[in-house]
Amino acid sequence: MDVLLIFRDLAIIIIFAKVFGLVARKLRAPQVVGEIVAGLLIGPSMLGIVKLNDFLGICAEIGVVLLMFSAGLGTNLKDLMKTGPKALAIACAGVFVPLAGGTLLYMLFYGFAPWGSEKFFTAVFIGVIMTATSVSITVETLKELGKLKSELGTAILSAAIIDDVIGIMVLTFVIGFRNPQVQPVFVLVRTVLFFALSVVIGFVIYKVFKLIDKRYPHTRRIPILALALCFGLAFLAEKVFGIADITGAYVAGIILSRLRDSDYIEEKMDINSYMIFGPIFFASIGLKTDISGITWEIVLFSAAFVGVALITKIIGCGATSRLCGYKGRDALRIGVGMMTRGEVALIVAQKGLAEGMISSVYFTSVILLIIVSSIVTPIALKLLFREKTKSPRRETAAR
C-alpha cells in the first residue's frame, strides 16, 4: 500500500467532506448529509478519484467506535434506566416488523417458497438485513440539534443498541436453522455474559476512574485511559462475545458517563472524530457505492427494498413508542430516528454472502438503503424537531 496515495486520499476526503458539510449546513441540512454526498462524488459512482481501501475502511470503523463512545459518555444513566423497558419493546418491534416485511417483499418479487428451501432462507435473510439499525448518523444529527442528551434521544440510542443485539441474535438463529453445525443458543449465552460482565467489571472500572479523576482532575491521562477502555471493550464485545464492536464502545461510554470529567473526555474524543475519523466514516458510505452494471430488475427491487425497510422501521418503532406512552410527534421522531442503516447492515449482508444465503446482486440494494436512509433520516429529524414559531403578523395581532 502506497503511503503517499493514502495521504492524497485523506486530503481529498477531508477537503470534500468539510466543504460539502458546510454547503449542507448553509442549505439548513445536517453536515453528515454533505459528507455522504462528498463520498458519492469522489467515489467510484461518479469521479472515481478515491477508492475505499483497507486503511480507509479501518479509519471509518474507528470513526464509528469513537462516535458511539461519545454517545455513551453523553448518555444520562437515569434516563437510560427510565427508558430501558420502553427501549426494549421498541427495539423488538424494530427488528421483527422489518424482518417480516423483508421476507414478504422477496417472496412477492420471486415467488413463495416452502420452509427449509434455499429460496425461503434467502427471503428470510433479506428481512434480516432490514433489521439492522445504524444509530451513528442519528447520533450526529441529534448532537447538532442539541437533543442527544434528552429523554427522547436516550430512548432512540437505547433502542438502537438493543436493536443491533437482537438483530445479531436473529442472524445467528437464521444461520443456525440453515446450518445445523451452528448452535443458535450460544449467541444468547454470549450476549447475556457480555452484559453481565459489563455490569460487574464496569462498576470496578468506574471506581478506579473515579479515584484517578479525583487525584488528577482535568488531565490528559484521563481521556487517554478512557480511549483505551473504549477500544478494549469494542475488541472484547466482537472478538470474544460475538457482539458488534460499537456496542462495546457504547457500554464503555456509559461506564464513564457519571464521572466528573465525562464532558472533558467527550470533548477530547470529539476533536479526533470531527477532524479526521468522522469525515472518513460518513464519506465511506458514498465510497462503498458502485452503481455500474445495475439492471432494471435490481433497480425496481432495490427501490421496493428501500421503501419497505424505511416504512417498517417507522411503523414498528413508531407504533410501539405510541403504545409505550410517547405522544404522536415524539413517537414519529423515534420511528424516523431508527430508520438509518449503516455498518451493521453491511456486516450482515457480507455474512450472508459468505454463507451463500444471498447473491452479490442484492448488495446494491443494501448500499442504496444505507445511502438513502443516511440522507433522508437527518433531514426528516431536523424537520420533526423544528419548533413551531408564530409569524410576526400573528404576534402583532395578539398584542
Image (spheres, rainbow, N blue to C red):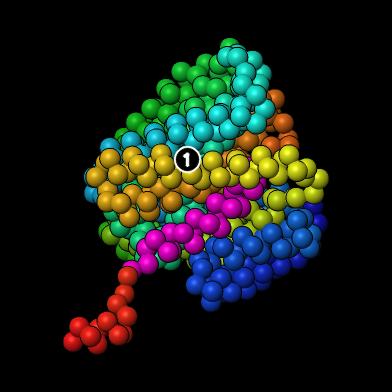
Residue at image x 37%, y 51%? 332
Residue at image x 71%, y 67%? 12
Residue 374: say if magenta.
Answer: yes
Lateral position of residue 71 relative to residue 216, left or right:
right
Q: Amino acid at mark 1?
A: Thr
Lateral position of residue 131 relative to residue 17, left or right:
left
**Frontmost residue, 214 versus 371:** 371
The magenta-colored residue range is: 364-387
Whether residue 252 can be seen here: no
Q: Residue furthest front?
A: 397
Lateral position of residue 74 relative to residue 246, left or right:
left
**Frontmost residue, 342 versus 77:** 342
Residue 97 position in % (x across, y down): 45, 34
Residue 1 position in % (x across, y down): 79, 52
Residue at image x 74%, y 58%? 43
| Residue 32 location, quadrant | bottom right
Secondary structure at numbered mark 1 = helix
Residue 340 position in % (x across, y down): 51, 49
* Rendered position, 379 above or below 361: below
Residue 184 position in % (x across, y down): 50, 19
**Frontmost residue, 363 versus 263:** 363
Q: Which residue is mark 1?
A: 312
**Frontmost residue, 47 versus 198:** 47
